[in-house]
Image: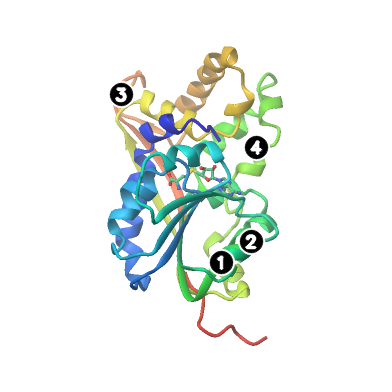
Amino acid sequence: MNEDGLHYSKHCELQKRDADVTLEQCLKYLKCRNGDCIMDVGAAEGSVTLEVLLPKLPNNFKQLLLCDISPKLLQFAKNRTDDERIDTREMDIASSTIPDEFDQHFDHIFSFFCLNWIGDRTKNVQAFKNIYDMLKPGGDILVTIAIHSPFFDFWENLAKIEKWAPYLKNVTNHISPYQKMHNPAQELRKSLEVIGFVVHVCEKQDNFYTFPSLSHLLEISKAVNPSWEFISQDERNNYFQDYEKEIKNHPKVIFETATKAEGKVRFPYEKLNVCALKPLKAREN
Ligand SMILES: C[S@@+](CC[C@H](N)C(=O)[O-])C[C@H]1O[C@@H](n2cnc3c(N)ncnc32)[C@H](O)[C@@H]1O
């Protein structure tokens, strides 16, 4: 992931639009009360949490914690607010344990387009177990995960080009494990129920976003990129020339103009929306 918070904050219109629509559709499933403790998993540099989620929360919450694996992105987020109830915490959501102080601590846990970065299915399920453990009984989650996006095709295709292969050799670690499943919504629902969740919504949605131009799509491609940190400054121009070719050749990325250089670009993606509850009483096995 590119850890340049300023760049991400300038090029995350798709993510903000998506979180806004998802919250409008799903907030009704969450039970907000006075003094709630809330976590956003994979909050990055805070745009979605602070600009989209925060205005929709009741303003009498007790704590809003932005967690992410990247300390650099979190530092950017921290500098964006002086609300003492809002804090950041570096954390790998797929790690084998959760911090003791987070055990059954949160009333609501949100996560937007983070868990698709955990490509290993076992680790992905571990992330959901950790989220479950951090919830109070009666707490709930609202999670979106990409199932498939042309980004994954771009990365997989670039990984086949000899000069970029070394930088993308671990790319499957960051490609959604739900991509190759026949029925991802059903598979995830089963895993959530085994963990103990009562699932209100676990549904696949086909979406698209229209970028104003190819250059906008290229900028988000730089923000959301698994090989960014490995590619030297000198090589980046060359890499993104090849990246641009991938975008132009993708059968499902639709260009408004024949030249493809100007004009709008329609970018399709599939995702899972999940709303689920940790029951007040754990199920007896
Ligand atoms: C595409 S960004 C999404 C950011 C924000 N939620 C949004 O919707 O714009 C994915 C974020 O997930 C974080 N991430 C990836 N793997 C993670 C992990 N194992 N634990 C915590 N955060 C992770 C990345 O650092 C990145 O900030």
Q: CA distance from mark 1 to mark 3?
A: 49 Å
Instruction: Please say if 218 is above or below 237.
Output: below
Instruction: Identify the residue shown where x is 44% and y is 45%.
Output: 269
| Residue assigned mark 1 | 134
Q: Earlier in the sequence, mark 1 or mark 3?
A: 1
* Residue depth check, mark 1 versus mark 3: number of the one nearer the observer: 1
Residue 169 position in % (x across, y down): 71, 32
Q: Earlier in the sequence, mark 3 or mark 2?
A: 2
Q: Is residue 273 visible?
A: no
Beta carbon of the mark 4 residue lies under 8 A of ligand 1: no
Q: Quadrant of residue 94?
A: bottom right
Instruction: Identify the residue shown where x is 68% and y is 18%.
Output: 163
User: Helix or strand or loop: what does disc 3 sit on?
Assistant: loop
Instruction: Please say if 91 is above or below 160.
Output: below
Q: Amino acid at mark 2?
A: Ile
Crowding near the residue tagged with mark 4, few <14, some 14–19, many ≥20 C-alpha atoms within 10 Å: some
Q: Quadrant of residue 60?
A: bottom left
Label tally = 4
User: Helix or strand or loop: what does disc 1 sit on?
Assistant: helix
User: Helix or strand or loop: what does disc 4 sit on?
Assistant: helix
Residue 147 position in % (x across, y down): 52, 51
Does the residue at mark 3 contact the one at mark 4 (Cβ under 8 Å)?
no
Q: Amino acid at mark 1?
A: Met
| Residue assigned mark 2 | 98
